[in-house]
Image: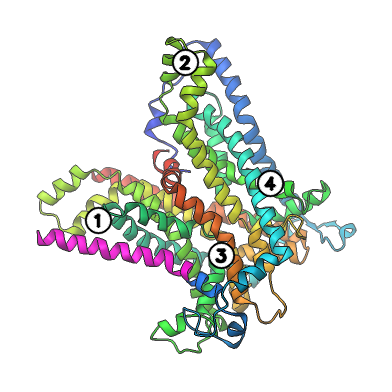
Amino acid sequence: MTKNLKANVGTIIGCALILIWCLLPVAWIVSLSFKSQEAVTNGSPGFFPSSGGGAGWDNYTQVLKDDEFRHSIFNSIGISLIATLLSVIIATLAAYAIARLEFVGKRFVLTTALVIAMFPVVSLVGPLFDMWRTFNIYDTWPGLIIPYMSFTLPLAIWTLSAFFREIPWEMEQAAQVDGATSWQAFRKVIVPLAAPGVFTAAILTFFFAWNDFVFGISLTSTDAARPIPAALSFFVGADPFNRPASLLAAGAVVATVPIVVLVLFFQRKIVAGLTAGAVKG
Amino acid sequence: MTATVETPHRATKAPKPPSSDRSRAENSLARKLVAPALVLMLVVTAFPMLRALYLSLFEYSLTAPDDRKFVGLSNYGTALSDSLFWRDTVNTVGIMIVTVGFELVIGFAFAMVMHKVIFARGVIRTSILIPYGVITVVSGFAWQFAFSNTNGFVNSWLPFVGDDFNWFGQYQSSMVAIMASEIWKTTPFMSLLLLAGLAQVSEDMLEAAKVDGATWWQRLFKVILPNMRAAIMVAVLFRALDAYRIFDNIFVMTAGANNTESISFLTYRQVIEQFQLGIGSALSVLLFLSVLVVAFVIVKLFRVNLADARQET
């Protein structure tokens, strides 16, 4: 009994440590975003805004009024959503073939995907920079959507094929035997079974596109296509020698909100997706 | 998402369907389904990589595109004989080893806790996903400001550093800050992969070890760890190769000041900031090759271990 109690205490302390680990830096950046810019310029060490050093929502209103920042949010949302949609459609086709069909070259596809998942992206920016300017898609949405698609496909294919392998495909025939047309069998039986996997792949793909930085700074030059991470890193404010930390923090919080919302709603699916391909193979 | 190519699942599948007509039809359908994905993946990686290989043989600067001239392998000679290249390689390898080491230990501890926890499972798993989801650039900023001596809290919380200690003033402490950001963001991913591996360790075996009087440490090292070698290998391989391309954190936190540059950052600087496409391409090729070497070394290291494990049982 005492042994059990000891183990429980250990688990509780462990849980507390995990929560601190995960949430402290997030709480810090939120807290920083409420410090006033004068306080930051004069130096305000400490976790919380000091008394009188708080800014209320000022940093947020200022950041959201900034044209460059607003453009970058719009770019990030648009580019990430389009890349996610296209990538998931293409990956679904490929994953179906990998999970369901026997064909020559299956291993080649899987190996290619694996190699690309580990590719050092920076080694591509030089040639892509050169190519994109030749094709006139440098600093445009397609110029980012195309690389995002190629780099999210491996993750999407691995996740989806792991999910598809678990689907009891016999149910499709069973429905047809029971009198359903093949379209009905597909729509009413297979789609509901496959949807969670497709959805999970979509979330992971979106995370990747939203997080990308290397392509974002290398393949854009204006706010026509510059995504949020790149915009944040170039944001210097009025005084280049004194970066407006609290303004940046407010921008960072805004950029993080969509991710936190996705995580809050779809925690279970994300965990399943992250680990599906990895262990089951 | 896996490096274990030989899986029981695929191995148990029938080698070939009996009817050759059907298998031919299946083959062609599969090709059509796979083609878009394959083409897209290769267009953005294999083709530019070949182009980098080609460009690396020229002296080619975008500021003077007409002066392109063939120089053979001399770009590689320049890169490999430059101390910058080796300094950055050492930095990158150092960051990779230290961060993956910390992530493995902390991530495993987190996985053990998450495996045990019954109450509040959802809360824990939700919060562990937040660092994973936070943009690397944001993580870099959060830690840069946290370590800042004017606006951060780290100096006042740590007992062994002075309040005005400038973390970004010299090499070692800058590296600590960069690694802190990297470790914070990626440990959760590691712990989730390890948790999935932990779930596959059979409870019966643990129970048997317990009955036989094995201590907690013995159970950990003789039962749990050997049984989840595959999961550990996948996690280490993925994280190591990811750490090897470290770029975002360095760009945001130090911009390479105090010799903290990584090999990715050096390549980026040559190509995008200085428009030296020739030498930049040579660096790109070297970066790609070094990733292959790292992957090869890790796979080799762990294969040996895997074989040992099989002989033991």
Q: Amino acid at mark 1?
A: Phe
Say few, some or many: other residues with alpha carbon within 10 Å of mark 4 (under 14 / 14 to 19 / 20 or more): many
Which quarter of the image is occupied by the C terminus of chain B?
A: top left
Say few, some or many: other residues with alpha carbon within 10 Å of mark 2 (under 14 / 14 to 19 / 20 or more): few
Q: Secondary structure at mark 4?
A: helix
Residue under pointer 2 = B17
> Residue at left 36%, top 63%?
A18
The verdict on residue A4 being magenta is yes
Visible residue check, residue B256: yes
Residue under pointer 3 = A253
Distance of label 4 from label 3 (alpha carbons): 24 Å
Residue under pointer 1 = B221
Tell me, yes or no, whether the two marked residues, 4 and 2, touch with CB atoms within 8 Å: no
Q: Secondary structure at mark 2?
A: loop
Mark found first going from the N terminus, 1 or 2: 2
Asked whether the residues under marks 1 and 2 belong to the same chain, the reply is: yes
